[in-house]
Image (cartoon, rainbow, N blue to C red):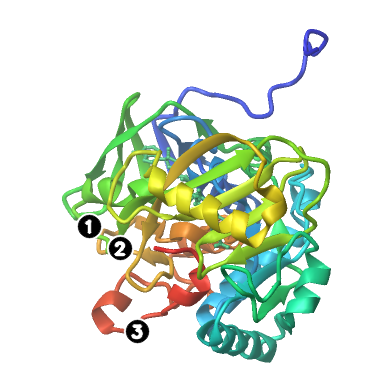
Amino acid sequence: ALRGHKGWDKQWTSPEPRAEYDVIIIGGGGHGLGAAYYLAKEHGITNVAVLEKGWLGGGNTGRNTTIIRSNYLYEESMHIYEHSMKLWENLSQDLNYNVMYSPRGVMMLSHNVHDQQSFKRHIHANRLYGIDNEWLTPEQAKAYCPPLDISASARYPINGAALQRRGGTARHDAVAWGYARAASDRGVHIIQNCEVTGIRRGPDGRVTGVETSRGFIGAKKVGVSAAGHTTTVMKMADVRVPLQSSPLQALVSEPLKPIFPCVVMSNTVHAYISQSDKGELVIGAGTDQYNSYSQTGGLQIITHTLDAICELFPMFRRVKMMRQWGGIVDNTPDRSAIQSKTPVPGLYVNCGWGTGGFKATPGSANLFAHLIARDEAHKFNAGLTLDRFRTGRLIDEAAAAAVAH
Ligand code: FAD
Ligand code: PYC
């Protein structure tokens, strides 16, 4: 069927690396590509390269379940995720690339009194900041998502739900490709199959460039956006980052006719689900309980998730699962991200988005570009410093992270 598809323009160019760039970004996921795009678009810095060891979006960007929401608890997080949400709303137009953003609503199920108290706390906090979030009764939850079983005899009874109507999903690879094309159009070099193996510093300790599988490439500034591999990259500059990398899994079913109108998450029983435009049920699990760099994960974790999905939505009991995969998520102790200068002049790090950084992609990229270009934080990422783990100014978002970890 694709035989007629000839003569299409490449979406981005694949140039040979220059000897030196003003900025090198390590990692061609959505965050790295987006940062390069905003460096060019908003700061006029176009002598930029994104170095990706594999293919664009082959990391967590292309492996996640694409849930977008901004219903976090603390001011620092609400600012950043809401900034992101506003960028999502116009991203397809901005990039001239359809990222298929679909604000179909994200509903979080409450199963017990503790869930109810915690969700209501989030709802009130969000509303104080003008962020939509509302409490639903079980009957209202069922009306919003008809496949949901709210019977009192269910194994995981539901006593209500928190709904963010503006939450939803987007097409993950389109986000990477859209940013790549738009950045490339503005002169950014996108260099795939180029693994960074070392970070070189001058006699004054400042970054001078990176060693790669394609040789040394000079840079005045280097931004690391390597998600699950952040600690290994930062070690190249002798910087320790408080992260633990572990597998997080997802799976998709055979395609079904449209049946599932929104996104549902059950944080207590460790399952989340939506339906893709192709018709597949997109289902995700909690993280494995051990650290690993393998992009797979324990069978018992997804077995437990499917068990929970079948209890919550009995009509899916006979649906077949088609594919399963894992990504490597980088969790901080307080489950909030780090976007910060480092002790090495000219080296910046964006990491710790853990199980929840897809939704943050536009906002994070936009603010990381600001940090690199101006050498100072924006007011929205000012709290995400590395040194909060020394000062104790933590931003505890373990509950809002919403995925078992
Ligand atoms: P990545 O896309 O992983 O990009 C980092 C890139 O760095 C990779 O491409 C990697 O190859 C490259 N790299 C690493 N080391 C080097 C090196 N030495 N040299 C060159 N390149 C290097 N978030 C949500 O908000 N909603 C969700 O529903 C959601 N679901 C998830 C489900 C799963 C199964 C997983 C795994 C994650 C999920 N997440 C979710 C989290 C989200 O996917 C990530 O937080 C986000 O995609 C991180 O984006 P990124 O661009 O930082 O990382
Ligand atoms: O952060 O919303 C989230 C999420 C859902 C599934 C994985 N992460």
Instruction: Give the Cα separation between the discs numbered 2 and 1.
Output: 8 Å
Label 3, on which residue?
393
Crowd rating for badge 3 (residues with CA inside 10 Å; few <14, some 14–19, many 20+): few
Q: Dots 3 and 2: beta carbons under 8 Å?
A: no
In contact (CB < 8 Å): disc 2 and disc 1 = yes
Residue closer to the observer: 97 or 246: 246
Is the C-beta separation of discs 3 and 1 under 8 Å? Answer: no
Q: Distance between the residues labelled 3 and 1?
A: 20 Å
Q: Is residue 134 in view?
A: yes
* Disc on the earlier residue, 2 or 1: 1
Q: Residue at x 60, y 70 (%)?
A: 81
Residue 43, horizontal then vertical, whole percent: 59, 57
Residue 239: image quadrant is bottom left
Split into quadrants, the picture shows ligand 2 in the one at bottom right
In the depicted structure, whether residue 75 falls above or below residue 352: below
**Location of mark 2 (residue):** 342
- Residue at 50 percent across and 30 percent down: it is 55
Q: What element carries label 3?
A: loop
